[in-house]
Image (cartoon, helix red, strand yellow):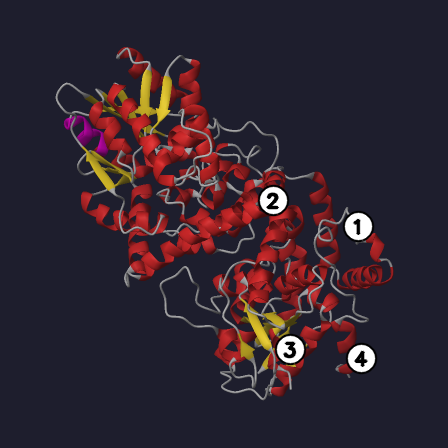
């Protein structure tokens, strides 16, 4: 099994630790992973702003970088959702279609493809799990409070395999953090208020870390935590699953 | 009645957020209703099947709207109801005015109808010397306050009881400083009783019109539609053409979903069927298009017409709860309003599909399974392609796509970006950067992952 590692642009630039943990975790689990060096971005920031028609070159580059792999794995629900729903390439339509079927967000790759049952990880801290909307409501990696369906959580089930972790239950289990891509600057007031409220839920439960499958939500909450002078840290779920 | 504001959603939301305690109160109030909705939904194991059934019934209605409308008209006329057709808001308002003129009526009572808000009926009739009093308690309060409703089910949810006491003090003559809900409700009850008894014409909305029987159903919790209609000589019912359902038995699906989704109640207190006018009285139904057939022709957006106006998408929307209904500057606020309004006026409502994080909670609570957040995404594409986007954003997007489609440009830009944050934070940490206003920038690492990978993994 040959896995192509897709690292979202802002993770590559600002959170290399999350990317390294993803790579090391996959290697630890015996997966052959390669990182195509010419990758940039999935095109989501443009598309969500209404400029999907300008993402043609991004799409073409993505297909070129990842067509050869059996699976593509990314430490992000949001970027994976975008590729699954919107990747198209007029020159290589079949390759684009096949990519949208074989791309996985990290935790669902671990639970659904590798069928991980145990992890050698240890993380002796109190942790809040932020359900990133695109992974949850878009990729269905967890059940959703709005729907009358059986409860499950792929990231939650993996965190439960980590030794000594103290995972809290939030008051609002799956409310959006307000990042929303360009929404965070175009609707600054509401975005910040949503972020503050989400952070407050975690703080109320006395967490030391906020984790999640999407670094973008975590970056947003980190910006608020730091401004508040909080000692609480954000950490990508890959870093916890790879810890110890 | 609508606010004539030139501010967009982001600016109006910024105003709303100046009072953070109020935002918290508004958010908690609506979240409480969302939780009641969850509780009601989870009590029915067949909830998801009900939603699917409702969605399919409405899909059938939209696919055969022409036939159902004619069937409804035929049966309604046979029942003794007069049926009128209005192509747009102006024609709807003219029909109402003509019907009132013909009966020499200059004072009308009206129960909840978001369609008449959409058509600006109250303002139109006032300009023609006809007084309209809204009889839904929440609507009466905002009417006295000279504000539009901020929510389609809970029109004055943005007002605190103390503020309502003050409005009643000013307009209904109660003492100042009263905020006891029971006292305020009783005050409104006495005030409205006099209105019900003296108005000869009543206008109501329509929740469901049954093609099979030619009857229509009006749902209220206060019984105000019934009080108005039963005491008047003329009952005018205004409905959007999408309000049809094929058969009476389908009410068993929709009435179970409507109020559970709206407020968490198992059913509305009053679900009243109107079929035949009482002797000596008249019932008029006005079937209003006002852009609905245009929306029906938009493949990506047509199923927004499945909406039964329960407002579950508003109650769950984290943006709505923190920006308030008035920030949407349209009759129907929130996520559903944001996919309906651009159909009526793309330029005026170009901001609304962007007033969302696309979190998807709206689509999950929708009792008729409208893919609201996907339509928000699609409206963004349509609006940008039609030129309704700020120029600065467009130029920025072009630079972004150009950078991100070239690996070498991307890596250079990334390096420069990290370098700027690290060594010249004042260039980004300033008031012109909306991120920095209330949030810190991420730390700037020494190297990117791709640089690390080159050093540590590549042969």
Q: Residue A141: tell me if it is visible.
A: yes
**Mark 2 → mark 4, Cα distance in angstroms:** 48 Å
Side of B69 relative to B437 (left or right): left
At mark 3, the secondary structure is helix
Q: Nearer the viewer, mark 1 or mark 2?
A: 2
Residue A102 screen position, x and y as percent? 54, 71
- Residue A33: name its quadrant: bottom right
Do tags 4 and 1 sit on the same chain? yes
Check chain identity for marks 2 and 4: say if they share one: yes
The chief SS type of the magenta part is helix
Q: CA distance from mark 3 to mark 1?
A: 32 Å
Determine whether B450 is above or below B228 in the image: below
Q: Secondary structure under badge 1? A: loop
Chain letter of mark 1 equals B
Q: Is residue B76 magenta?
A: yes
Proximity of marks 1 and 2: CB atoms separated by less than 8 Å: no
Spatial distance from mark 1 to mark 2, Cα to Cα?
21 Å
Q: What SS does tag 4 mark?
A: helix
Disc 4 to disc 3, C-alpha distance: 20 Å
- The percent coordinates of residue B50 (x first, y second) are 29, 56
Identify the magenta region: B72-79
Residue with the mark numbered 3: A239
Decide: is B98 above or below B180: above
The residue wearing badge 1 is B430
Q: Residue furthest right?
A: B423
CB of mark 2 within 8 Å of CB of mark 3?
no
Of the two numbered discs 4 and 3 in the rendering, the one whose residue sits closer to the viewer: 3
Instruction: Give the spatial CA distance, label 4 vs label 1.
Output: 35 Å
Q: Residue at x 24, y 29 (%)?
A: B227
Neighbours of disc 1 within 10 Å: few (<14), some (14-19), many (20+): few
Question: Is B129 within the magenta?
Answer: no
């Amino acid at each position: 099994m040959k896995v192509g590692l897709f690292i979202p642009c802002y993770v590559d630039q600002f959170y290399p630790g999350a990317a390294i943990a993803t790579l090391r975790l996959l290697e630890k689990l015996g997966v052959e992973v390669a990182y195509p060096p010419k990758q940039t971005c999935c095109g989501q920031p443009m598309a969500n702003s209404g400029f999907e028609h300008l993402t043609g070159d991004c799409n073409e580059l993505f297909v070129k970088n990842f067509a050869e792999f059996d699976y593509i794995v990314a430490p992000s629900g949001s970027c994976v959702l975008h590729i699954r729903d919107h990747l198209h390439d007029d020159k290589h339509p079949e390759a684009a279609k096949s990519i949208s079927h074989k791309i996985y967000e990290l935790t669902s790759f671990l639970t659904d493809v590798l069928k991980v049952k145990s992890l050698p990880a240890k993380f002796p801290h109190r942790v809040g799990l932020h359900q990133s909307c695109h992974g949850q409501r878009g990729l269905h990696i967890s059940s959703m409070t709005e729907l009358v369906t059986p409860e499950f959580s792929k990231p939650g089930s993996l965190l439960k395999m980590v030794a000594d972790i103290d995972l809290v239950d939030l008051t609002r289990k799956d409310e959006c953090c307000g990042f929303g891509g360009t929404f965070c600057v175009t609707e600054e007031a509401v975005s910040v208020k949503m972020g503050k409220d989400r952070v407050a839920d975690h703080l109320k439960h006395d967490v030391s870390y906020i984790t999640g499958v999407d670094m973008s939500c975590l970056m947003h909450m980190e910006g608020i935590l730091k401004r508040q002078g909080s000692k609480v840290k954000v950490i990508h779920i890959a870093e916890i699953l790879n810890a110890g | 009645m609508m606010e004539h504001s030139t501010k967009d959603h982001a600016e109006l939301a910024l105003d709303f957020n100046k009072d953070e305690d109020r935002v918290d109160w508004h958010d908690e109030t609506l979240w409480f209703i969302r939780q009641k909705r969850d509780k009601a939904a989870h009590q029915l194991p067949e909830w998801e099947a009900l939603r699917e059934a409702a969605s399919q019934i409405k899909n059938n209605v939209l696919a055969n709207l022409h036939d159902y409308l004619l069937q409804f008209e035929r049966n309604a006329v046979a029942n003794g109801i007069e049926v009128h057709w209005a192509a747009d808001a102006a024609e709807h308002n003219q029909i109402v005015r003509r019907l009132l003129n013909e009966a020499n009526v200059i004072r009308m009572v009206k129960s909840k109808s978001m369609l008449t808000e959409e058509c600006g009926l109250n303002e139109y009739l006032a300009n023609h010397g006809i007084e309209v009093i809204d009889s839904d308690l929440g609507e009466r309060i905002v009417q006295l306050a000279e504000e539009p409703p901020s929510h389609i089910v809970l029109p004055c949810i943005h007002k605190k009881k103390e503020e309502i006491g003050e409005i009643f003090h000013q307009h209904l003559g109660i003492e100042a400083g009263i905020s006891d809900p029971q006292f305020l409700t009783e005050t409104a009850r006495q005030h409205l009783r006099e209105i019900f008894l003296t108005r000869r014409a009543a206008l109501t909305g329509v929740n469901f019109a049954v093609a099979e029987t030619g009857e229509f159903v009006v749902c209220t919790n206060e019984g105000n539609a019934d009080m108005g209609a039963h005491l008047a000589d003329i009952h005018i019912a205004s409905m959007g053409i999408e309000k049809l359902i094929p058969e009476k038995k389908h009410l068993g699906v929709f009435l179970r979903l409507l109020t559970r989704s709206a407020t968490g109640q198992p059913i509305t207190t009053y679900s009243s069927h109107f079929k035949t006018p009482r002797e000596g009285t008249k019932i008029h139904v006005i079937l209003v298009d006002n852009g609905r057939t245009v929306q029906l022709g938009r493949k990506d957006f047509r199923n927004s017409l499945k909406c039964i106006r329960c407002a579950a998408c508003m109650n769950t929307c984290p943006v709505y709860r923190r920006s308030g209904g008035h920030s949407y500057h349209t009759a129907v606020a929130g996520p559903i309003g944001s996919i309906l309004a651009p159909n009526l006026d793309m330029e005026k409502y170009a901001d609304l599909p962007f007033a969302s994080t696309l979190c998807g909670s709206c689509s999950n609570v929708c009792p008729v399974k409208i893919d609201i957040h996907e339509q928000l995404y699609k409206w963004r594409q349509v609006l940008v392609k039609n030129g309704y986007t700020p120029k600065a954003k467009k130029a920025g997007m072009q630079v972004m796509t150009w950078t991100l489609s070239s690996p070498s440009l991307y890596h250079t830009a990334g390096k420069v970006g990290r370098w700027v944050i690290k060594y010249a934070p004042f260039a980004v940490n300033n008031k012109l950067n909306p991120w920095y206003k209330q949030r810190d920038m991420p730390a700037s690492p020494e190297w990117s992952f791709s640089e690390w990978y080159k050093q540590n993994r590549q042969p």
